[in-house]
Image (cartoon, grey):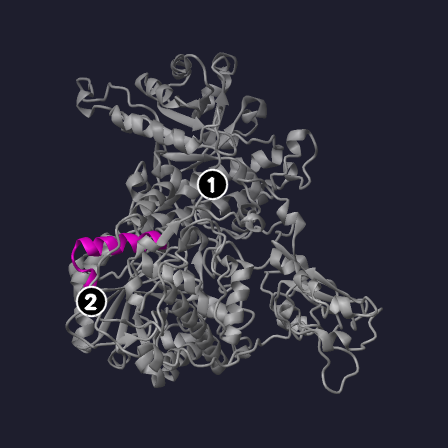
């Protein structure tokens, strides 16, 4: 761009960026100030007028971490939905998209968050597309950090159809006409704005377009001649009849766009007579049959065609722009003229991920509009369309500030585009055009998945009996109580006591059978009710209910508003609470759907496992599975079909690492180090530790391989497929840096891929390298889920792997670009069935162990995974939820997790002890073991291995209508 790489610069917002939730302080507050120390974002402070009292929480600071809510001793803080946030935008420009765009415009950085994707499983339009990624057999490109160049430059204009037909004069000067063309460094042009902006907006966009070397579309009534310094970056939109009346514009213009007409090519000819160097774009509204018009214009010599839809991506007759675009591209290809003309597309392009998806469907570049206004703090309220003044006065913004924000947004989009291209292994954006084979379409994948569910059950070779494995591990012994570590537990209901009426008589405490009410020994007054124990309005039917027995009518039960803010579509509030209860008590899950299913609308949430498929069997089923089905190597079995996934030192605290290792030892299973090295404190648990070898090779030493029975190669991670690992600088403390042999305070990247692996043969050399160090080692290969994941799995088998670990795209992470968490690769449910079927067809299914992860939340999900074809699952997020994770996604922000989980901050990490972490995880596993025993008994199975591949027990029920409160997050 202008001969050098343009970088972002800070452009702070004029208005606070809204957040989904607000914390509110009730009259139960005792002004103790504990919330001040609990919140690391500065939401709470004492009142300036009276330091004895607390001021109202600052809404602009809240990150929905629940730390203050959990640590309030009186339950006086409540999280509520932010009404202003919920009112933002519309169904395309959702509140989350608008706020993300504004944050990108402020700093120019890629949006990064932790905890994994929490939105719908799939959807319409852009949410129906997952981009592919490359792995082992098709290496990726590491372009985002500058190690490899990836071009995002595109060519605009008609190409020469026949070089051999060029004519030259006697002096060999070219006589043939070369069509005019332009190049832009990012495949984005600025379109006509749907709202009429003021001069400040136009000046901002013109300056930004010139800096980015792209083009801004203006109409004649916007007086483009007032911006002579930007003439080379203006695209003037004209009606055919204005070619003559606005002739002065054509004399200086470099590009024009011509509105639809019966014969727009005649206007093109006249424009070229006035200015032969002019590049013309013909606008074609998206509608059914538009592909015929595109072909006609291309055959008439059109240089570029703009397929346009409204701001929501719909054409004149309601057709989807993406559908129309794909039809146009396909017909141009079939006619053999696709490379002659530039095809641009606009309408509904609201986020960075929409650019590669639009290009995959056939566009050369995109034209954006509304996001440019959002960058300057437009909230898409629509008031300007009704003639009302803009509530944020964007019509009068400072052009330098506005341009900086637009440039920041476009640079963030460019870097996110590089992430997608790098994951796909492409070096040039032009290679992406029309490559629909490098995309996974959710509707097509769903049909294929449903078809797989109807296939006959796989008759597998039984594993050698492992009698008593599950019982030796003590899975069915009584659980240890592991109470919550916070004064307040999050429940479904609030028991409100009117202190002006209550006399502390204690009748409620004596009557309540759930011990909601209590009086601490030595105190006269009753303590704050334990709200999480209340069962809600159904208790009112009991004559001993506190509401009924209170003689002063001082007690009432209300729905806790936390249900409106806690969780997301994948981990709903009820799923989180159920997991906390299981980890706290060890009690098995209940059979209710709310405790076993989320609200994502697909995948595990759309599959049901038969409730009873036989007469049942007596006794306990064997839950153990082998981890080696090859004739050579160690014979290792685990008593439950679950082990812990990789979480690196730096991503989580040492306390959590130790607690996970202690839990694995007690249960007789494994947990992985992640890629951050092998702390010395883990050596006592070496027999239950998986040493992970990732692309950065952080902390990988021969001694950590020699002490391991099980080593994992991490080629990819489901939450950021094709992108490698990233530890943010804030979490790279001196202790973490020493372990990784790095400089403290610097961001650490694990480049993707292994730059020594470009084929299955190279992959085998990696496995052989480990076995040269430790001959009896079991080797797992962790991969993500590209479209050809079945080929990757077979390649890993022939490379010598004992375990293939598939990590689906909706898994958890300590930090990942948001564009990667929902858009790259396919969900684990589809990949599991695909890989299992291919291994069966290759005749090697019984010689390899298939473990899966990335969206497994419940014991029922474990059983569904195995019925789809897996041998077992790898848990990550569920273990963290067991130790109080609320999935706020702040793992990577500032000091890390405010409640001590995903942090190495010395002031935050000690909130947990390894022993408490151990007990909570052990309780969760025991809880699930009891549940799986019960379900297997109902299915007349004596072993968990009998369930593998039994898709005849699965029913696809379609989306669950449970998404209301999460709809606009």
Label placed on residue 337: none
Label placed on residue 211: 1
Q: In which quarter of the image is residue 953?
A: bottom left
Q: Please name the residue shown 30% across and 69% down the image.
A: 943
Q: Please name the residue shown 20% across and 56% down the image.
A: 840
Q: Is residue 422 at least partly visible in the picture?
A: yes
Residue 373: image location, x then y, percent: 57, 39
Residue 709: image location, x then y, percent: 26, 78
Q: Quadrant of residue 280?
A: top left
Observer-nearest residue: 135 or 516?
Answer: 516
Q: In which quarter of the image is residue 346?
A: top left
Observer-nearest residue: 942 or 728?
Answer: 942
Does the magenta-highlighted stretch encompass residue 838? yes
Q: Is residue 886 at least partly visible in the picture?
A: no
1 and 2 marks in contact (CB < 8 Å): no
Q: What SS does tag 1 mark?
A: helix
Residue 277 as seen in the image, left or right of residue 91 = left
Residue 592: image location, x then y, percent: 51, 60
Q: How crowded is mark 2: few (under 14 residues within 10 Å), some or many (20 or more)?
A: some
Q: Mark 2 points at which residue?
A: 766
What is the count of numbered marks? 2
Boundaries of the magenta span? 829-846
Instruction: Work out which residue is located at the far front of the displayed protein and give it.
Output: 615
Q: Please name the residue shown 67% across and 49% down the image.
A: 83
User: How far, Cα to Cα, is label 1 from label 2?
Assistant: 46 Å
Residue 838: image location, x then y, percent: 22, 53
Using the image, determine if residue 2 lies above or below residue 167. below
Observer-nearest residue: 952 or 237?
Answer: 952
Observer-nearest residue: 734 or 666?
Answer: 666
Using the image, determine if residue 637 lies above or below residue 965. below
Mark 1 against mark 2, which lies toward the viewer? 2
Quadrant of the frame with the N terminus: top left
């Amino acid at each position: 761009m202008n001969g050098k790489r343009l970088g972002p610069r800070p452009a702070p917002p004029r208005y606070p960026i809204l957040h989904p939730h607000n914390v509110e302080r009730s009259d139960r507050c005792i002004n103790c100030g504990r919330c001040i120390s609990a919140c690391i974002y500065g939401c709470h402070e004492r009142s300036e007028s009276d330091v004895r009292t607390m001021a109202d929480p600052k809404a602009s600071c809240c990150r929905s971490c629940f730390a203050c809510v959990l640590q309030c001793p009186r339950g006086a803080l409540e999280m509520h939905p932010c009404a202003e946030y919920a009112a933002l935008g519309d169904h395309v420009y959702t509140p989350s998209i608008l706020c993300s765009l504004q944050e990108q415009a402020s700093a120019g950085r890629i949006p990064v968050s932790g905890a994994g994707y929490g939105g719908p499983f799939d959807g319409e339009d852009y949410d129906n597309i997952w981009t592919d990624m490359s792995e082992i057999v098709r290496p990726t490109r590491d372009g985002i950090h500058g190690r490899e160049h990836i071009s995002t430059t595109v060519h605009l204009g008609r190409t020469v159809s026949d070089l051999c037909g060029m004519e030259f004069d006697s002096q060999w000067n070219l006589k043939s006409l070369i069509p005019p063309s332009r190049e832009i460094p990012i495949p984005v042009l600025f379109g006509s704005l749907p709202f009429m902006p003021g001069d400040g907006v136009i000046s901002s966009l013109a300056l930004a377009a010139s800096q980015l070397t792209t083009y801004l579309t203006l109409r004649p009534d916007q007086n483009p001649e007032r911006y002579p310094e930007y003439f080379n970056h203006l695209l003037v939109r004209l009606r055919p009849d204005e070619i003559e009346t606005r002739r002065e514009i054509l004399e200086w213009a470099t590009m024009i766009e011509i509105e639809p007409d019966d014969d727009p090519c005649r206007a093109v000819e006249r424009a070229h007579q006035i200015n032969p160097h002019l590049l013309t774009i013909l606008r074609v509204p998206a509608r059914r049959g538009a592909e015929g018009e595109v072909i006609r214009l291309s055959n008439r010599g059109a240089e570029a065609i703009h397929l346009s839809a409204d701001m929501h991506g719909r054409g004149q007759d309601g057709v989807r722009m993406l559908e129309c675009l794909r039809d146009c591209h396909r017909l141009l290809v079939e006619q053999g003229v696709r490379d002659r003309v530039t095809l641009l597309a606009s309408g509904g392009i609201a986020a960075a991920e929409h650019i590669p998806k639009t290009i995959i469907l056939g566009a050369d570049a995109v034209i954006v509009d509304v996001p440019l206004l959002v960058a300057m703090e437009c909230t898409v309220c629509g008031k300007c369309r009704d003639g009302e003044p803009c509530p944020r006065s964007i019509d009068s913004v400072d052009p330098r500030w506005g341009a900086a924000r637009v440039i920041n947004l476009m640079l963030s989009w460019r870097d996110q585009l590089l992430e997608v291209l790098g994951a796909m292994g492409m070096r040039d954006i032009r290679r992406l055009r029309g490559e629909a084979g490098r995309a996974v379409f959710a509707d097509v994948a769903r049909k294929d998945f449903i078809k797989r569910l109807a296939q006959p059950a796989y008759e597998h070779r039984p594993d050698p009996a492992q009698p008593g494995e599950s019982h030796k591990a003590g899975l069915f012994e009584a659980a240890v109580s592991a109470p919550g570590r916070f004064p307040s537990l999050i429940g479904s209901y609030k028991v409100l006591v009117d202190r002006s009426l209550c006399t502390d008589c204690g009748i409620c405490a004596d009557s309540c059978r759930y011990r909601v009410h209590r009086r601490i020994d030595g105190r006269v007054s009753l303590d704050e009710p334990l709200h999480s124990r209340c069962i809600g309005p159904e208790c009112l039917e009991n004559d001993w209910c506190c509401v009924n027995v209170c003689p002063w009518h001082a007690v009432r039960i209300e729905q806790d508003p936390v249900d409106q803010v806690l969780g997301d579509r994948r981990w709903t509030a009820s799923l989180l609470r159920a997991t906390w209860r299981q980890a706290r008590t060890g009690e098995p899950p209940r059979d209710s759907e709310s405790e076993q299913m989320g609200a994502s609308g697909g995948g595990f949430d759309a599959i049901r496992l038969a409730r009873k498929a036989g007469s049942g069997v007596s006794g306990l089923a064997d839950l153990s599975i082998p981890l080696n089905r090859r004739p050579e190597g160690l014979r290792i079995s685990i008593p439950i079909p679950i082990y812990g996934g990789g979480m690196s030192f730096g991503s989580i605290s040492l306390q959590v690492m130790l607690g996970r290792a202690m839990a694995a030892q007690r249960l007789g299973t494994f947990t992985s180090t992640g890629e951050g090295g092998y702390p010395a404190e883990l050596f006592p648990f070496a027999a239950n530790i998986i040493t992970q070898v990732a692309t950065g090779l952080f902390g990988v030493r021969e001694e950590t391989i020699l002490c391991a029975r099980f080593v994992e190669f991490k080629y990819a991670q489901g939450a950021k497929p094709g992108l490698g690992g990233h530890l943010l600088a804030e979490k790279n403390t001196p202790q973490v840096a020493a372990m990784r042999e790095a400089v403290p305070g610097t961001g650490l990247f694990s480049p993707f891929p292994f730059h020594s692996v470009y084929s299955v043969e190279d992959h085998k050399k990696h496995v052989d390298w480990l076995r040269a160090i430790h001959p009896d080692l079991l080797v797992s290969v962790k991969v993500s889920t590209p479209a050809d994941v079945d080929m990757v799995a077979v390649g890993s088998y022939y490379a010598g792997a004992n375990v293939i670990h598939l990590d689906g795209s909706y898994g958890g992470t300590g930090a990942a670009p948001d564009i990667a968490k929902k858009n790259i690769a396919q969900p684990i449910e589809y990949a599991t069935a695909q890989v299992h079927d291919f291994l069966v067809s290759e005749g090697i299914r019984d010689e390899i162990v298939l473990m899966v992860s990335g969206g497994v939340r419940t014991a029922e999900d474990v059983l569904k995974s195995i019925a789809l074809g897996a041998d077992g699952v790898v848990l990550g997020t569920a273990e963290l939820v067991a130790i109080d994770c609320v999935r706020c996604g702040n793992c990577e922000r500032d000091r890390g997790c405010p409640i001590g989980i995903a942090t190495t901050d010395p002031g935050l990490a000690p909130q947990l002890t390894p022993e408490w972490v151990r007990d909570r995880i052990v309780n969760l596993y025991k809880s699930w073991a009891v549940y799986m025993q019960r379900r297997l008994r109902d299915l007349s199975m004596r072993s968990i291995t009998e369930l593998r591949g039994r898709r005849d027990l699965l029913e696809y029920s379609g989306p669950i209508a449970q998404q209301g409160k999460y709809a606009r997050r």
